[in-house]
Amino acid sequence: MGPEERRREETQRGEKRGEVGSPVLRGSRSGHNGGMSDSPAPLADPHLVFDPVDGVRDVVILGSTGSIGTQAIDLVLRNPDRFRVTALSAAGGRVGLLAEQAHRLRVRTVAVAREDVVPALREALTAEYAPGETLPEILAGADAATQLAASDCHTVLNGITGSIGLAPTLAALEAGRTLALANKESLIVGGPLVKALAKPGQIIPVDSEHAALFQALAAGTRADVRKLVVTASGGPFRGRTKAELANVTPAEALAHPTWAMGPVITINSATLVNKGLEVIEAHLLYDIPFDRIEVVVHPQSYVHSMVEYTDGSTLAQATPPDMRGPIAIGLGWPERVPDAAPAFDWTKASSWEFFPLDNDAFPSVGLARHVGQLAGTAPAVFNAANEECVDAFLNGALPFNGIMETVTRVVEEHGTPGTGTSLTVADVLEAETWARARARELTAQTARTAPMAQTTTAEARA
């Protein structure tokens, strides 16, 4: 019996036993990780299935009242034969919606990050449930989502926004759950920590771009990949020069032409910081060097990303803009969920455009590549400083171009992270704390030296 046959027989035995943590090889490609390469498996590998299960999958949804969470719940409710939600978590700003979701899904547990909203949540749950019905357990506090991530289920969907999603990501991985990952910041700020815990096939990406790459990579081996091409809509300011961006208002920046998202992600799409983060994420997920990851502007947002192979073929994953498709990949892989999202009507004419990225007007992608190559705490500094600058811009305290100018300065002051030691959660938190404080200091200096610009921006926002 050759080595490949032996591996396949061992895999089949593991699948029959239903062993958690024994990834199942899909197809018959050579190589211990499904043929992506002969090196250790990347974080996301479409050729592997972690913890296979027949029948209904128990799912925990983190960030249930946000955009990803609400669309995931829509998908679950339309497919009760495939998915069952056991627990929900949310920040706590929409307790009425959280209570409604809990009742419709009949979950065992709900969690909120804000302890002060527990009385309001309990009141909302009481209003939703009929007399005599058992209310779900309530968890509250900064660690509540992390507790849920480690609870008994098959899949954890991490739809939390921001680096606060790192701890739940690590908890889900350590507990042996399949992780449907929409929280890109987990990888950005804690890539080495995630890599140290994740087992082959355990992470399924939910970002539309990375779900697209995931599907396109299933068609070949990593040895045959020439480059990854990440698409960007270009946001509301596509085609504008850097000078033309100087006086744009928050209202203009929040008017995304394609996607309906939260304010931070929408501003990140306007600056293309979001795309820079996705380049780092693609590098970490698929173990492809930064010089083989490109960004191209595609205003229609039909093609969500592409993989170019060494034979000249380019495989593109395309659907109308709708996050329910990527969510269905995250929750259901390797099976597809019928009618998860709308499909194209090919009887109607349409035009698809692609443009090169303007790195002068949008320097965020280049800076993200730089911090990604620096690694260590540099990506955490980049992300934290950007979050502070976005908040300052939305509050009229920083001009649009000032976002990246300030983030660049913070990254430069941080310098090259120390080498020779492993990254820890404490390192990440310390770097983030410093970056946020320094970004606020620089933002305050900008506001003092440009009071007229601040007033103009604030008036435009109002």
Image (cartoon, rainbow, N blue to C red):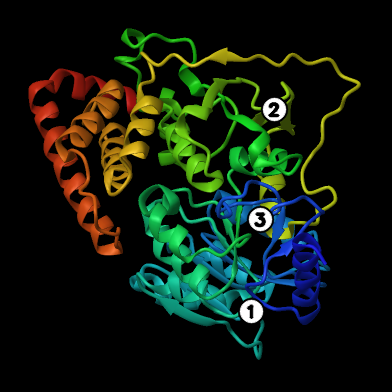
Q: Mark 2 and mark 1 in contact (Cβ < 8 Å)?
A: no
Neighbourhood count class around disc 3 (C-alpha, 10 Å): few under 14, some 14–19, many 20 upward: many
Tell which of 416 and 213 is nearer to you. 416
Choose the circle earlier in sequence order: 1 or 2: 1
Single out the residue that lies furthest toward the bottom: 132
- Report helix, strand or loop for mark 1: loop
392 w.r.t. 146: above or below: above
Mark identifier at residue 33 = 3
Q: Position of residue 365 (x, y in %)?
A: 41, 27
Q: Amino acid at mark 3?
A: Asn
Q: Which residue is mark 2?
A: 302
Tell which of 8 and 215 is nearer to you. 8
239 w.r.t. 455: above or below: above
Q: Position of residue 258 (x, y in %)?
A: 60, 28
Mark identifier at residue 129 = 1
35 w.r.t. 195: above or below: above
- Report helix, strand or loop for mark 2: loop
Q: Quadrant of residue 454?
A: top left
Choose the circle earlier in sequence order: 2 or 3: 3
Q: Amino acid at mark 2?
A: Tyr
